[in-house]
Amino acid sequence: MNTSNAIEILMAAGLTTFVVAGLVTAGMTTAIVTGAAIGSAYLLTK
């Protein structure tokens, strides 16, 4: 295995990790915003 292959594999792994982390973060943000909206709507209609 030469160096360029190792670098390409590392780049691919890094990009995959970055994309997964982005999706998880976006999911958490959406969940927090949705939860806050539901909570405030619940309090307003209570």
Image: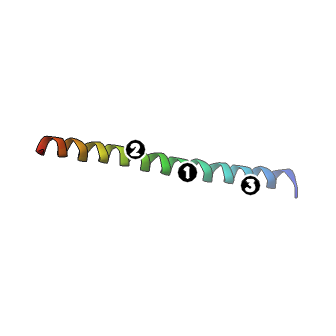
Cβ atoms under marks 3 and 2 closer than 8 Å: no
Residue type at the position of mark 3: Ile
How far is disc 3 from disc 1 in space, using C-alphas? 15 Å
- Judge the density around disc 1: few (<14), some (14-19), many (≥20) Cα neighbours within 10 Å: few
Which of marks 2 and 3 precedes in the sequence?
3
Identify the residue under disc 2. 29
Identify the residue under disc 1. 19
Badge 3 marks a residue whose secondary structure is helix
Badge 2 marks a residue whose secondary structure is helix
**Left or right of residue 38: residue 23:** right
The residue lying at 43 percent from left, 47 percent from top is: 28
**Left or right of residue 29: residue 44:** left
Residue type at the position of mark 2: Thr
Q: Nearer the viewer, residue 2 or 23?
A: 23
Cβ atoms under marks 2 and 1 closer than 8 Å: no
How far is disc 3 from disc 2 in space, using C-alphas? 30 Å
Q: Nearer the viewer, residue 21 or 6?
A: 21
